[in-house]
Each structure stands twice: as C-alpha cells, then as structure tokens.
C-alpha cells in the first residue's frame, strides 16, 4: 500500500471584499439577518480580468512553493470547479500551462460543492495505485458570475476563491476511508442549469444561468447527509467522532456546520470554521479552510482530519485522512499507468 502526504497547501482570494453592508445597498436584507442565519460577514469577489483558472493558478503556486516541489515534477493536476473559464479546455489544463507542469496530465471534476472531496479521493486513489507520485489537487470558483445579484435568497451566501494542495506518495498517512454519494432525483433543489457564457452588455445572463435553490430543504438535507456520511466513514475506520482531531466541513452556513457538530457530539474546537470571511466558495471552501487550519498550526503530524461536503446533484460525502507532512516518498516505482505529459485541450 502506498500512502500519501500533503506536501504543501495554498489559497488565494480576490482582493475585492463585498461586505454585508454593501449587500444592504443592493437587496432588501440586513447585516444582522445574514449573520444570524448564515454566519457570513463578508466575501471576496473576482475582478473583471480574473477567472477560475487565474485564482487556481495563484493558489497552486503557493502550494508548490510550500511543498518545495517544481511544477515539472507533477504527474497530474485535478481541478474541482463548477465555474470553469469555459466548457474546455479544463481549468486543470490552464493551470498546467501556467505552471509549466510539462509532464502532468490534467482534468476537471464537477460535483458542485462536493467537488473537492471527489477530486481529493480521486487523487489519493491514483497515488495508492502507484499511477502517480505527485498530484496537484485544486478547488477554485468564481461563483459571483453565476449569482443573481437581485435575489436576496441566494446572493448573500456565495463568494470567490481557490485552494490547492500537493499530494505526494509517502510511507505514512493518507486516506483512512471515504464515502461519495449522489441522489440526482433531487436535482431541482439546487441547480444552475444554463450555459453562463450568454450574457448581455450589462453582464446579465438568462435566469437559468444563476444558482437556484430551495434553501430550507437543502439546509435540512445538508445536516443529515454530512452527519451520516461522516458516521459511515468513521465506522469503516473503526473510529468514533471524539477521535477526529479536526473536522473541515464545506463552509455553506455556520448553522449547518453547528448542526453536524452537534449531531456527532463534537467539541467546538474540533471543527474548522472560516465562513465569516469568505461565504460559500463551493469547491474552494474545503481546501481554503484546510490551508488556513495548517497556517494556524492545527494540523499536526498523525492528526485525524475529517472532510465533509454536500451540494448540487444532490451530491455529498466525507473523507477521513491521517495527516502526514513529513513522510518520505518511496523510491521511484512507476511501472504501469504513469501519467504522460499532456496538453489535452479538446
Ligand atoms: N435577507 C433578509 N431576509 C431574507 C433573506 C435575506 N437575504 N433571504 C430570505 N429572507 C427571508 C425570506 O423571504 C423569509 O421571509 P418570510 O418569512 O417573510 O417568508 C425569511 O427570511 C425566512 O426564509 P427562509 O428561507 O425560511 O430562511 P432560512 O432560515 O432557511 O435561511 C438560508 C435561508 C438560505 C440562509 C438557509 O435556508 C440555508 O442556508 N440553506 C442552505 C443553502 C445552501 O447552503 N446552499 C448551497 C449548498 S452548497
């Protein structure tokens, strides 16, 4: 069994901050309502020239630098996003080019806000199978481009950002288990079904390009689904909730996170929360929170780190990792399935 470690983490958010006070001037809402119902105080919004791939590239550069790994050493780049720059090329291919990752394959994963957990699970399987030794896994979004800024029911929730990590083959650490689930029959509860390129001169798209949802139904579902996915993942690893060192949940709503923590009987310090500064950044929320937790010194060697997410699909799941930063990569054994350099652009 080949284990894997997280060799480096990076994050990036656009400079512009949109506060709740700003939103009070845009729709009929209040700072107090947003904080009470969601925990969000502000979010970052991409500038006109920024795209998901530019955010992803900025986060990836930090992760590589902290990992002290050259881009040419990457075997694979996986980017989770629901807001790619275009239908193709993939965001991962654009990042591959931007980094000069000359040997890396690249593809995107779309599982809405569950994208990062799905991408990370995929990456760990590549390493576990011996098909890749160094993988860049990214979550990046410019959700501000698919938010209807006239709809107070959704526009207060979302923000833009990117997080990235470098996974590397190691002698210790890696996934202790994961659960990925989907129920496409509930697709009408959370969706953005249109092609968002079609916009008029004012930047307005057709209504079906925007995120639409049944907020209360999603809220109830999220607490239940993430709790069950975490319980199943923990029980597969023969561990109890009290043995989680840090839970890094998708940051969609503070009350959802508190609901999951309460259902599992977690202590407040067991859950990572940074939603107040960024809002819901979909695929980017977990890697951004994971990166911030590492910066705060909350991810010690050997820690058991649980991730959980939910989103459009509906899709949900959880993953449990034994955290390792200092594992020694095994000697090169690249027989079978090594990713070859690719500039696949469609
Ligand atoms: N400001 C002020 N009032 C608002 C508002 C806003 N931004 N948005 C909704 N309201 C109003 C509603 O119109 C409603 O008014 P009414 O009682 O007069 O009809 C009232 O607040 C309560 O609305 P409701 O939708 O029941 O509130 P809620 O407590 O469920 O909170 C969400 C709404 C959206 C914050 C919450 O349901 C939620 O977070 N759901 C999950 C959504 C999510 O995470 N989606 C992304 C998944 S990845």
Image (tube, rainbow, N blue to C red):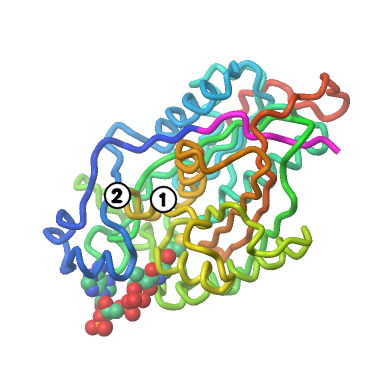
Specify the principal SS of the magenta part. Answer: strand
Relative horizontal placement of residue 193, taking residue 339 as reference (left or right): left
**Where is residue 329 shown, x and y percent of the image?**
76, 24
- Residue reaching furthest left? 25
140 and 202: which one is in front? 140
Looking at the image, can residue 211 be seen?
yes
Picture quadrant of residue 39: bottom left
Picture quadrant of residue 31: bottom left
Relative horizontal placement of residue 125, taking residue 41 as reference (left or right): right
Number of numbered discs: 2
- The residue pinned by badge 1 equals 281
**Which residue is painted at 83% across and 19% down in the image?**
331
- The residue pinned by badge 2 equals 43
Q: Is residue 134 above or below residue 36?
A: above
Indicate the quadrant containing the C terminus: top left, top right, bottom left or bottom right.
Answer: top right
Looking at the image, can residue 89 be seen?
no
**Which residue is painted at 71% across and 62% down in the image?**
234
């Amino acid at each position: 069994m080949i284990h894997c470690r997280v060799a480096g983490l990076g994050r990036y958010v656009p400079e512009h901050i949109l506060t709740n006070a700003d939103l009070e001037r845009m729709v009929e809402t209040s700072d107090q309502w947003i904080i009470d119902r969601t925990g969000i105080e502000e979010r970052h919004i991409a500038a006109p020239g920024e795209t998901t791939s530019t955010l992803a590239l900025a986060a990836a550069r930090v992760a590589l630098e902290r990992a002290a790994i050259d881009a040419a050493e990457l075997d694979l780049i996986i980017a989770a996003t629901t807001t790619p720059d275009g239908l193709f090329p993939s965001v991962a291919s654009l990042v591959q080019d931007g980094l000069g990752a000359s040997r890396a394959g690249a593809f995107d994963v779309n599982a809405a806000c569950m994208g990062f957990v799905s991408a990370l699970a995929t990456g760990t399987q590549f390493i576990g199978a011996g098909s890749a030794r160094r993988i860049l896994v990214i979550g990046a979004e410019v959700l501000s481009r698919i938010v209807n800024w006239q709809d107070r029911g959704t526009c207060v929730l979302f923000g833009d950002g990117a997080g990235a990590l470098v996974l590397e083959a190691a002698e210790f650490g890696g996934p202790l288990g994961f659960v990925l689930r989907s129920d496409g029959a509930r697709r009408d509860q959370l969706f953005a079904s249109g092609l968002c390129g079609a916009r008029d001169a004012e930047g307005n798209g057709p209504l079906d390009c925007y995120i639409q949802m049944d907020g209360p139904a999603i809220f109830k579902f999220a607490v239940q689904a993430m709790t069950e996915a975490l319980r199943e993942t923990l029980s597969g690893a023969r561990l109890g909730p009290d043995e989680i060192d840090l839970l890094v949940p998708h940051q969609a709503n503070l009350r959802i996170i508190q609901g999951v923590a309460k259902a599992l009987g977690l202590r407040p310090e067991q859950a990572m929360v940074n939603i107040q500064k960024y809002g819901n950044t979909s695929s980017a929320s977990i890697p951004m929170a994971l990166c911030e937790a590492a910066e705060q010194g909350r991810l010690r060697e050997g820690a058991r780190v649980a991730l959980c997410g939910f989103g459009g699909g509906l899709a949900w799941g959880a993953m449990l990792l034994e955290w390792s930063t200092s594992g020694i990569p095994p000697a090169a054994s690249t027989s079978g399935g090594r990713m070859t350099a690719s500039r696949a652009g469609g």
